[in-house]
Image (spheres, grey):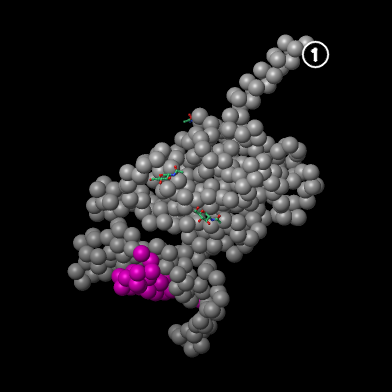
Amino acid sequence: MSFSLFLGLLVLALTCWSRSIPASPLLFPPSCNDSRVLSVAGLALQGINNDRKEGYEFSLNRVANVREHRQKTGSSSVYYFTLDVLETDCHVLSKKRWKDCTARHLHEAVYGRCKAIFYINLPKRILYLPAYNCTVRPVSRKKIVRMCPDCPTPIRINSLDPGVSQAVSQSLEKVNKEIAVGKKFYLFQVTQAFSQWVFGPAYFVEYLVTEAPCSKSLPGSETCLQPPADSKPVGLCRGSLSKMNQDKHVSGTCKFFQTQPPSATGSHPPEHQDPPQLALPTPAAPLQEGPRGSVQLLPELVDENNEGGQENKSFMAFPGRIDLTVEPLGEVLHLPSRFMLEKEEMPTVLPFPEGLGSDGCPGPAENSNPLILPP
Ligand SMILES: *[C@@H]1O[C@H](CO)[C@@H](O)[C@H](O)[C@H]1NC(C)=O
Ligand SMILES: *[C@@H]1O[C@H](CO)[C@@H](O)[C@H](O)[C@H]1NC(C)=O
Ligand SMILES: *[C@@H]1O[C@H](CO)[C@@H](O)[C@H](O)[C@H]1NC(C)=O
């Protein structure tokens, strides 16, 4: 090979390298608005929701950052996601798909950021979430009050507020009178509470309930058992209690959870609005097994003029991190044996890449209100 040809090839190789892979030779930064990225991000977020045991499901507001690490074998990739999320009205125990849930109103919004590592191997039908870490905060009360002074105000659910306990007990009484047939519902846990002044105090509550069967002993009277101590919540109820002079109004409705939790992503027909490039595989096994991450709820953000760049500010506000490895060249990611990968097919996981990815990041937000976007 002539020297100039060699040099030409080298220059070509270096230009390709520097154009497509600026950060690390192994990491590719796709656009955050890429349809494949959005599909995979949606699956990763479903995996996070499925793994959680408490709180409300997150929906994807935008992909803030993404890197793709294409693996050497088996047309598979490890994705490193930074996802901006919003809390929805579905409890995680409902096991609903986050796309079927509704983000909360602005005044009751909880928003934040999840980091997630997600392995996808389409030929082998593997979707696997090895790790995630989410940090969320309620929307700034000060800013909401400025926009909407009369909006409901959140009440800390462990504050033993007498208005909250009255609203819960009276709405539960109504639920038991109106919809419980042959059984009785019992309070498991209050999950959310708001108060508002509308011609008088009003309370809005959400709570999980358990159930226990009742039997008719004498006509017109029922004996109900107490639910066993380890009984699981069967549904999420919403109730309200408002007072005006001598009148009071009580409401209560419940949504019951599916008794057979669907598998992570496979049991639903692909949605029409799902981007077409990615045919969703039916996972060979449930997406998740055991806890691999956590969600931290922090207090609302107070505006501080903290020094440091934008990234520092963002990290201080939503400090979640994933430390699967610190090896600069990565480590083998050991998948559960049920996935049946050959040793040389095992993916490599790198330290979670920080810093900006592609120019196409962050992607467009579903709701671009700055009050609910991490800095
Ligand atoms: C972020 O800013 C704080 C000051 O607000 C500074 O003490 C800290 O060293 C900075 N961290 C980074 C990673 O730049
Ligand atoms: C998530 O990130 C926070 C903040 O850096 C850290 O304290 C916590 O241990 C992390 N959780 C997991 C499961 O890695
Ligand atoms: C994102 O992609 C969609 C469809 O591919 C396009 O309509 C939209 O303009 C893009 N948005 C941005 C901000 O690039």
- Quadrant showing the C terminus: top left
Task: Give residue 149's position: percent from left, percent from top.
Answer: 24, 52
Could you say which quadrant of the image residue 49 lies in? bottom right
Task: Give residue 35's position: percent from left, percent from top.
Answer: 57, 34
Q: Say whether mark 1 is within 8 Å of ligand 3.
A: no
Task: Give residue 93's position: percent from left, percent from top.
Answer: 54, 61
Does 222 appear above or below 10? below
* Left or right side of 185 for 198: left
* Left or right side of 314 for 75: right
Q: Is residue 370 magenta?
A: no
Task: Give residue 359's position: percent from left, percent from top.
Answer: 50, 29
Looking at the image, which is closer to me, 102 or 109? 109
Looking at the image, which is closer to me, 372 or 99? 372
Residue at 50%, 65% in the rendered image: 235
Does 262 appear above or below 343? below
Which residue is tagged 1? Answer: 1
Neighbours of disc 1 within 10 Å: few (<14), some (14-19), many (20+): few
Q: In the structure shown, which secondary structural element does the residue marked by tag 1 occupy? A: loop
Query: Of the residues shown, which amino acid type is indicated by label 1?
Result: Met
* Left or right side of 367 for 250: left
Please count the marks in the image.
1
> Which residue range is magenta in the image?
156-183
Q: Is residue 158 magenta?
A: yes
Does 243 appear above or below 354? below
Residue at 36%, 51% in the rendered image: 301
